[in-house]
Image: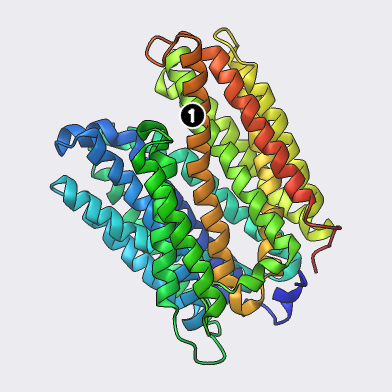
Amino acid sequence: MDPAHADAAPPASNASWLGLERKWWVMASVGLGTFMSALNGSIVNAIVPVLMRELKMDLGTTEWVTMVFLVLVSGLLLGFGRLGDLVGHKRVNLTGFAVFATGLLACGLSWSAPALIAARGVQAVGAAMLMATGPALITRAFPGRQRGQALGMQGTFTYLGLMVGPALGGVLTERFGWPSVFYVGVPFTLLAMLFTWRAVADGPAAQRRERFDFAGAACFLAGLAALLLALSHGEAWGWSSVRTVGFLASAVVLLGGFVAIERSAASPMLDLSLFAARGIRAAVGSALLNYVCVYAVMFLVPFYLLRLRAFSPSEAGLLLSAQALVMAIAAPLSGTLSDRIGSRLPSSLGMGILALGLVGLSTLDEAAPKWAIAVRLAVLGLGTGIFVSPNNSAVMGAAPRNQQGVTAAVLACARNVGMVLGVAIAGAVFARTIAARGGSLETLVGFVPAFRVTFLVTAGVAVLGGLTSLARGPRQAAH
């Protein structure tokens, strides 16, 4: 597919509203929606002990407060992406904001564990609608020469939401109680909904009447849910246990059935010919590997800072902010560069820098100075920031206009699967290495060697991601 394909038609009208071009209001709307969706995927991690105490939940039940959000968002992304292509992305996006705000209110008002889990499910439905339609709205609103910059800014909102969530959740819970974690997002969600309603043009829906692929959507949701559950709990259950093997086998059967349905459906949810383009395959694959690395860091580094080094939560948060800050600066700049020279080289360079940062992280020990920790995390942020904008721009630019919703959903699915894989890989390597040295996370014996091995393995994943990015083919400048 031609990367300029998405520019075959002009972007949506950019007439001003309140003195600002409408495309920037679209960015504000999508950015807020993206930030709130990512934030609420991670913010609950900080309040798990409080939820266990206040709602009298055991650890297994508490895990479902997080898992129901992740599983439903991941499983529904493709369906809502395709629905946006059929009925219009603005309509699905507005509905998503309304459902998401309802879910936030319901979470804050929850009186029991089942009520909170059900409310998180409602919230996940809205988040899936927002994640599936956001990149498509940006791609329509901005011309090709600004697409990388705009998608870079959106990528910044995603990473900031994921990174800020745990720290913000802890502060809000300590000062205002755990329901405030959910209530605080309601006014911002409604504000973003207003921006979408006023600033986003009514885009074209499908040119011919097509039926929604309910069979494919159900098969994909069930298959991806089985896969994510196996990856999330495989280490605890045992990778060879009946439960883990059963979920993995179910995932293979269901996702295989999904592929078969899509190949034969008259109006498939996911047109598999989309992956005929080497550039899209490579960009989606490298996005997945990037998130494996990012989430391995987000999972394990807090243990290093809080347990091994005994830093205070505020000290740890300040150090972790170095990664988010550098990434937020680098992503839009890298997007602007990719608009001029193409996506292949910046994306591949970003993964290479990420690999170097992970190698640097593996050298940390119990005596490393704070500046050394901050520098290594900043390098990780630089690599991620350089990678994400060109990569997202390459995928969205190569997608036909009538499949931009489902293409955005494919990218988001790769992100979510990468997140779960990152935690699974980092957790398994760390646990096995520390156990082999006669230690544990409780005693901290063997922590540094296990930390080193884990991030050397993760650096290898980043190198693989860089090679995958290079495999997208010769440079193609953005049009």
Q: Is residue 57 above or below residue 313?
A: below
User: Would residue 199 appear left or right of 240 to someone viewing this image?
Assistant: right
In the depicted view, which residue is nearer to us: 352 or 233? 233
Residue 407 in sight from this viewpoint: yes
Measured as percent of width and height from the top left, residue 167 is found at: 41, 34
Residue shown at 60% from the left, 19% from the top: 452
> Can you name the residue that lies furthest to the right here?
474
Identity, as a three-letter code, of the amino acid under mark 1: Ala
Measured as percent of width and height from the top left, residue 95 is found at: 37, 72
In the depicted view, which residue is nearer to us: 374 or 260? 260
Residue with the mark numbered 1: 428
Residue shown at 33% from the left, 67% from the top: 98
> Can you name the residue that lies furthest to the bottom here?
208
SS for dot 1: helix
Residue 109 in sight from this viewpoint: no
In the depicted view, which residue is nearer to us: 95 or 441? 441
Q: Quadrant of the C terminus?
A: bottom right
User: Would residue 237 appear left or right of 134 to someone viewing this image?
Assistant: left
